[in-house]
Amino acid sequence: MSSAPLHAIDEERAIMAATWAARLADGQVPEDQSVELQAWLDADPQNGVALEETVGAWHAVDHYAASAQMMALREAALSSARKSLARRERRWTPQRLAWAGLAASLMVAVIFAATFAWLSPRTYETAVGERRVVALSDGSKVSLDADTVVKVRYTGKERRLWLERGRARFDVARNPLRPFSVTAGDEVVVATGTAFSVELVRSQLRVVLYEGHVAVLDRAQGDVRRTVDVGSRKVPADQLLQPGRELVIPLKAQGQLASVIAPAAIAPIDPVRTLSWEAGQLVFEDEPLELVVERMNRYSQRPIKVGDAAAAQVRVSGVFTAGDTDALVQGLAAAFAVKARNEPDGVILLKERTPNEGG
């Protein structure tokens, strides 16, 4: 009686283990296939071993490791492997078990090294003072401001990105069947073909729309549409967020009550001014000093800090070269009597008291 070569059996086993793990992790296995899965596990003790190694590889991927189905699969695979091995141990010599296990392990390792690389987001990052434009595989472009981190993961069904720090502009290649989403904080900005920017600054999320249309979803509320207050009504933000407008969403700090967070708001903006950072210019129009300082610090090796409440109340208008903190400090001293105190770890801005002020 002939049998298939051992390497062919092991390759098929590894592929089947990957297939079953992927189906179960994505919740795509109907109940009527559970019998088929159990039959495959019972057919050979090495099937359970291969599946156990597969599950272990996916423990490195948070999305799958946290899945209740994956955890249940892991336990089922272990149990089935032990039972199958006990029933069949007389039919396998130690040498054959050793070689089969080694071959399966190597095959699974190769497959899941590639799978892990495919599932893991690719990170694009800029240092302080650095800007960068990234062309993505679908024709979309991402322009990163200084001190910014963006992660990207594409699949056949969706294009997912995460803004972890800083600011980025997204020019999205149109594909209605493959949504393009950017997650920042608890918000998800979804587009099919458009241009917009997303920024994390001063405990806020800011979304500027340049063309097209986006939907903004609140993850903390179960991916419901983000709303803004219009009189006594709550209106979906995407109905009001038109090109040339900015959506500002205050972010909840740790331990902060939701009831004390300011509502989201939409305001008109100058698109050219908001994109001046791409040309190395920072333009401010009646902006709070804390926001000005945070944006300037993306370009400065010596960070600036606002040292007191009086200085924090100063509002700044002007055009500054990115990274030219000396010009900012001089302008603040001349216009607002804000002085700079040099410290080992940076510059502290303090409001000078006038003779008419007490203390």
Image: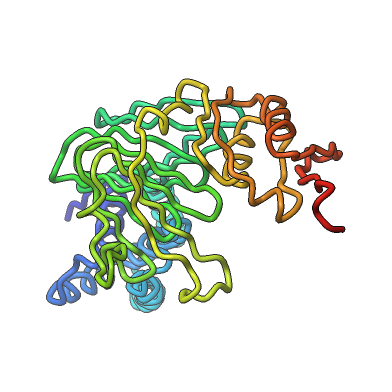
Q: Residue 82 in the image: x percent, y percent?
A: 41, 76
Question: Which quadrant: the C terminus?
Answer: bottom right
Q: Is residue 235 left or right of residue 120?
A: left
Q: Is residue 54 visible?
A: yes
Which of the pair 339/14 is nearer the observer?
339
The residue depicted at 19 percent of the width and 65 percent of the height is: 28
Residue lying at the far front in this picture: please name it.
356
The residue depicted at 81 percent of the width and 51 percent of the height is: 356
The residue depicted at 58 percent of the width and 73 percent of the height is: 255
The residue depicted at 42 percent of the width and 52 percent of the height is: 184
Q: Residue 163 in the image: x percent, y percent?
A: 44, 46
Q: Residue 3 in the image: x percent, y percent?
A: 21, 52
How many numbered marks have been drawn onto this rendered protein structure?
A: 0
Which of the pair 331/76 is nearer the observer?
331
Which of the pair 132/206 is nearer the observer?
206
Question: Which quadrant: the N terminus?
Answer: bottom left
